[in-house]
Image (cartoon, helix red, strand yellow):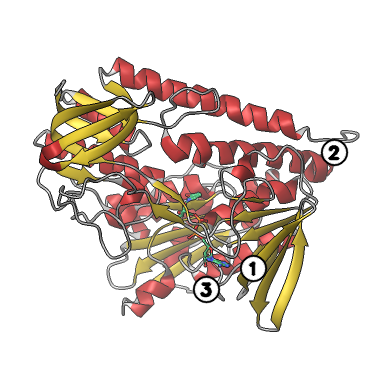
């Protein structure tokens, strides 16, 4: 046995690297184990989020939105451009450079905080020992007082559309197309399907999204989901609901998919097909048989509210445990666990984890939807404000969508903030901060918001909860 650590973290994604940095800050002797090899053939920190998830997809979303604006919207402002063209390899290599900078930055932070990096595969053994299989195949065993499992998730594969990363790709392959597919199929109208579908639609692909469920974005507030479906359809995304994929056949560089919908058997042919039907936790070769760490019935590592597993001193965080598969949820769990190991009484508010879909307009929310609250028997007051009535949104030529604030009818406490529109993610975060402090709609209404800002739409929606909005006619007058 070569070394003993206070904390060993398996996995260097947004859960693991944040946990490791926080543990080191708290004076704990910490190691992190990471095996992912980036495009340069070097160990890259940051997990799915930095390497093949949140960050690269946002790089492509931003590039493609700029192209779309130059192509479609500049003329409204009086700007003429001549022919606008997109060089896809340049767009993709810009994305790669951002990934390289960020993963390198995290590597530097790990070092600066005195965390020891082991490059290779980590596996928990009994007795809080951790086996590391190095990239060269050499095996060493480390000992720890505490182990944090942060092995993340991987895309779900489905038998009717086996991924070959050429014609049929998953979310990773879809970040590296070297040209714009003429016809693009997407399986799954979830977060990834809509974000990546948007990227390629903006660049000119004819995009068809095949979604098995009948209800669009079931986790979102119904009013927001309805508006979002309208907006995305207007942008040219063909979204087929209640359509279940049954098979696919690749030939001559194209793929023909079969699916069933309300009208029976259908077929469609695409140049590329993105499979985005969810992600599953990574636990393969993570736990030796005698560790006594339990999994739940869905294959996630079973943890309590504080991310403690069934084995004292062993914790698990992020996508490998229950809850939404979101980088910010993983990071906060990492901080909580590191602090608890250091003896602090840290906890995390699982009720206020914001969700964002980075389409344009963005779709974001925090707290509960009007429908969920009503189903729970909570009486609510609702205030909405459309961006069409916002001076700032008009100035930006970006007026689709609305802000919706849902408050308890008895106490006026804000229970949900739901936004579709420009900077929805940032506006929802303002709601999240206020909700964390138990805000009422009246409190938000009494605050001074800068003019002219998009944030005023949140102010007005909060005022509208009690019939006091100034810049729209109130549904409810008091
Ligand atoms: N912006 C973000 O926060 C962000 C971005 C990307 C990914 N993520 C996370 O990554 C995870 C995975 O994302 P995702 O979009 O793959 O999953 P998802 O669960 O959001 O959506 C998958 C969709 O595929 C549909 N589906 C499943 N099987 C199907 C089939 N056979 N035919 C047709 N449709 C089918 C499902 O009904 C669902 O609507 C999510 O948990 C998400 O939160 C988050």
- Residue found at x 43% / y 32%: 36
User: Looking at this rendering, what residue extends furthest in the right direction?
Assistant: 82
- Residue found at x 12% / y 49%: 311
Q: Is residue 341 left or right of residue 65?
A: left
Compared with 381, 397 (above or below) is: above
| Residue position marked by numbered label 2 in the rendering | 78
Q: Is mark 3 within 8 Å of ligand 1?
A: no
- Decide if residue 370 is in sight here: yes
Q: In this view, does 378 lie to the left or right of 60?
A: left
Nearer the observer, 218 or 378: 218
Q: Is residue 207 left or right of residue 324?
A: right
Q: Earlier in the sequence, mark 1 or mark 3?
A: 1
The mark closer to the camera, 1 or 3, is 1
| Residue position marked by numbered label 1 in the rendering | 247
Q: Earlier in the sequence, mark 1 or mark 2?
A: 2
Instruction: Tell me the tag on residue 347.
Output: none
Image quadrant holding the C terminus, namely bottom left
Q: How far apart are marks 2 and 3 (CA)?
A: 37 Å
User: Looking at this rendering, what residue extends furthest in the bottom direction?
Assistant: 263
Q: Position of residue 92 (x, y in %)?
A: 66, 32
Residue at disc 3, secondary structure: loop
Q: Position of residue 312 (x, y in %)?
A: 9, 46
Q: How far apart are marks 1 and 3 (CA)?
A: 49 Å
Residue 243: image quadrant is: bottom right
Q: Position of residue 323 (x, y in %)?
A: 33, 57
Q: Which of marks 2 and 3 is nearer the N terminus?
A: 2
- Residue found at x 30% / y 56%: 300
Instruction: Tell me the tag on residue 475.
Output: 3
């Amino acid at each position: 046995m070569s070394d003993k650590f206070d904390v060993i973290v398996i996995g260097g994604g947004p859960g693991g690297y944040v946990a490791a940095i926080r543990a080191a800050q708290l004076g704990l002797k910490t190691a992190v184990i990471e095996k992912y090899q980036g495009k340069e053939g070097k160990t890259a920190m940051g997990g799915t989020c930095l390497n093949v998830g949140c960050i690269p997809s946002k790089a492509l979303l931003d590039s493609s939105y700029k192209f779309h604006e130059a192509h479609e919207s500049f003329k409204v402002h009086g700007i003429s451009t001549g022919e606008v063209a997109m060089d896809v390899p340049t767009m993709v290599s810009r994305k790669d450079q951002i990934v390289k900078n960020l993963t390198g930055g995290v590597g530097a932070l790990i070092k600066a905080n005195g965390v020891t990096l082991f490059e290779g595969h980590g596996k928990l053994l009994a007795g809080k020992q951790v086996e590391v299989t190095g990239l060269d195949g050499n095996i060493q065993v480390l000992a720890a007082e505490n182990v944090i499992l942060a092995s993340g998730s991987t895309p779900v594969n489905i038998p009717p559309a086996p991924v070959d990363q050429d014609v049929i790709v998953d979310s990773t392959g879809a970040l590296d197309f070297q040209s714009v597919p003429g016809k693009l199929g997407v399986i799954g109208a979830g977060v990834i399907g809509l974000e990546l579908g948007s990227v390629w639609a903006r660049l000119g692909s004819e995009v068809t999204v095949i979604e098995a469920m009948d209800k669009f974005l079931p986790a979102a507030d119904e009013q927001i989901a309805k508006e979002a479906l309208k907006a995305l359809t207007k942008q040219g995304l063909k979204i087929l609901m209640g359509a279940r994929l049954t098979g696919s056949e690749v030939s001559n560089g194209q793929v023909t998919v079969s699916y069933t919908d309300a009208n029976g058997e259908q077929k469609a042919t695409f140049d590329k097909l993105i499979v985005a039907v969810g992600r599953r936790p990574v636990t393969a070769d993570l736990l030796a048989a005698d560790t006594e760490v339990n999994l739940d019935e869905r294959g996630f590592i079973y943890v309590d509210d504080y991310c403690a597993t069934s084995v004292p001193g062993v914790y698990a965080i992020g996508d490998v445990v229950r809850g939404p598969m979101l980088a910010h949820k993983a990071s906060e769990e990492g901080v909580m666990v590191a602090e608890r190991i250091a003896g602090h009484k840290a906890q995390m508010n699982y009720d206020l984890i914001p969700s964002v879909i980075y389409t344009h307009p963005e779709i974001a929310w925090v707290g509960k939807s009007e429908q969920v609250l009503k189903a729970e028997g909570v009486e609510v007051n609702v205030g909405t404000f459309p961006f069409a009535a916002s001076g700032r949104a008009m100035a930006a030529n970006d007026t689709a969508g609305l802000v919706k604030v849902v408050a308890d009818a008895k106490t006026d406490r804000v229970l949900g903030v739901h936004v579709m529109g420009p900077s929805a993610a940032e506006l929802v975060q303002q709601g999240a901060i206020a909700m964390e402090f138990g805000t009422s709609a009246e409190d938000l209404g009494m605050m001074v918001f800068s003019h002219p800002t998009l944030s005023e739409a949140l102010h007005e929606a909060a005022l509208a909860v009690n019939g006091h909005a100034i810049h729209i006619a109130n549904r409810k007058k008091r």
